[in-house]
Amino acid sequence: MRDASPPNLHISRHPLVAHKLSILRDVSTEPKKFRELVRELTWLLGYEAMADLAPRAKQVETPLEVTDGAELEPRVGLVPVLRAGLGMVDAMLELVPTAEVWHIGLYRDERTLKPVEYYNKLPDAATVQICLILDPMLATGGSAAATVDILKAWGAVRIKQVSLIAAPEGVATLSGAHPDVDIHVAAIDRALNERGYIVPGLGDAGDRQFGTFAGPGSEPGHGPDPETVEVVRRLQRDLTS
Ligand code: PRP
Ligand code: URA
C-alpha cells in the first residue's frame, strides 16, 4: 500500500492560506485575481518551505553598532514546471532575490496522464544546492516525479516540491519514488476524478491563470477516455491495497 501521508509531507495550517485557497478554488474567481492568489499563496508556502535552510552567521553594522546577523547559505534554484508553475516564480524571487530560475517544460498527456517533456533549460551540471520545484497541482504525481528524476540526473541533491493542491494519489506516487523530497502544500484534496483532475480542486491551474480554454474533452457531457479511467483506477488501487 502506498502512503498518502508520508513524513515528508507538510500541509500548511496557516489561516491565511486556508482563506486565500478558498477564493482560489471558487469557479467565479477571474484570471487576474487567480494569478494574484497564486502569487500570495506561493509566498506563504515558500516561507514555510524554507524554514529549515541553515543561514550562515554574518556581522552587520547598524547605524549604532555591529551586531550578529545571518545570511542565507545555500544557493537556491527555483524550478517552475511550465506552464502553471510560472505563476509561482515572482513570489519566490521576492523571498530569495538571489535564486536562479531553471525552467522545465512538461505537459500531461490527456489520455495516458503521463508527463511529456518539451523544454529543459538546465545547464550540464547543477549550480545550486537546493531546488524548489514550483507547480500548483500535484495530481497523479507523474509530472513531479519526472521533474525530480530530471533534477537528480542533473546533480541536484536537495529537492523540495511546492504545490498549492495535491491529491493523495500524487503524494503517494512522488513520495514512493522519491522519499527524500519534502512536499509542501496548502491542501490535500479528496481524490482524482476519472479524468485525473483533483477534486474538489480548482480545475486546470494553467487555464485559470492564463485565461485559456481546456478544450471540449474537459467539458461535462464528454466522457473520459477508458485508458484515463484505468490509469486513475490503478493509482487508487495502489493507495488502498
Ligand atoms: C498540470 C500541472 C502539473 C500537472 C499535474 O500541468 O501544472 O504540471 O498538470 O498533473 P500530474 O500530477 O498528474 O502529472 P498540465 O499538464 O495541465 O500543463 P499546463 O501547465 O501546460 O497546462
Ligand atoms: N492539472 C491541473 O491543472 N489540475 C488538476 O486538477 C490536475 C492536473
Image (tube, rainbow, N blue to C red):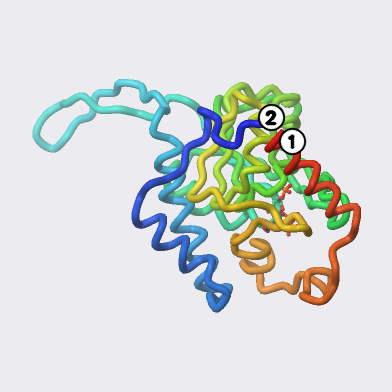
Q: Secondary structure at mark 2?
A: loop
Q: Position of residue 207 (x, y in %)?
A: 69, 67
What residue is drawn where x is 86% and y is 49%? 230
> Closer to the N terminus: mark 1 or mark 2?
2
Query: Does the beta carbon at disc 1 come under 8 Å from ligand 1?
Result: no
Q: Looking at the picture, which amino acid does disc 1 mark?
A: Asp
What residue is drawn where x is 77% and y is 48%? 106
Which residue is denoted by mark 2 in the rendering? 1
Left or right, residue 7 beside residue 137: left
Q: Quadrant of the C terminus?
A: top right
Q: Secondary structure at mark 1?
A: helix
Which residue is denoted by mark 1 in the rendering? 238
Left or right, residue 3 beside residue 94: right
Judging depth in this view, the residue of 218 and 37 nearest the camera is 218
Q: Position of residue 137 (x, y in %)?
A: 63, 52
Q: Is residue 17 above or below residue 173?
A: below
Furthest residue toward front: 241
Q: CA distance from mark 1 to mark 2?
A: 6 Å
Left or right, residue 223 beside residue 16: right
Q: Looking at the picture, which amino acid does disc 2 mark?
A: Met
What residue is drawn where x is 41% and y is 40%? 48
Check contact, mark 1 vs mark 2: CB within 8 A.
Answer: yes
Q: Position of residue 180 (x, y in %)?
A: 59, 23
Q: Position of residue 6 (x, y in %)?
A: 55, 30
Classify mark 2: residues with Cα within 10 Å, few (<14), some (14-19) or many (20+). Answer: few
Classify mark 1: residues with Cα within 10 Å, few (<14), some (14-19) or many (20+). Answer: some
What residue is drawn where x is 48% and y is 63%? 37
Which circle marks residue 21 in the picture? none
Left or right, residue 114 beside residue 188: right
Q: Quadrant of the N terminus?
A: top right
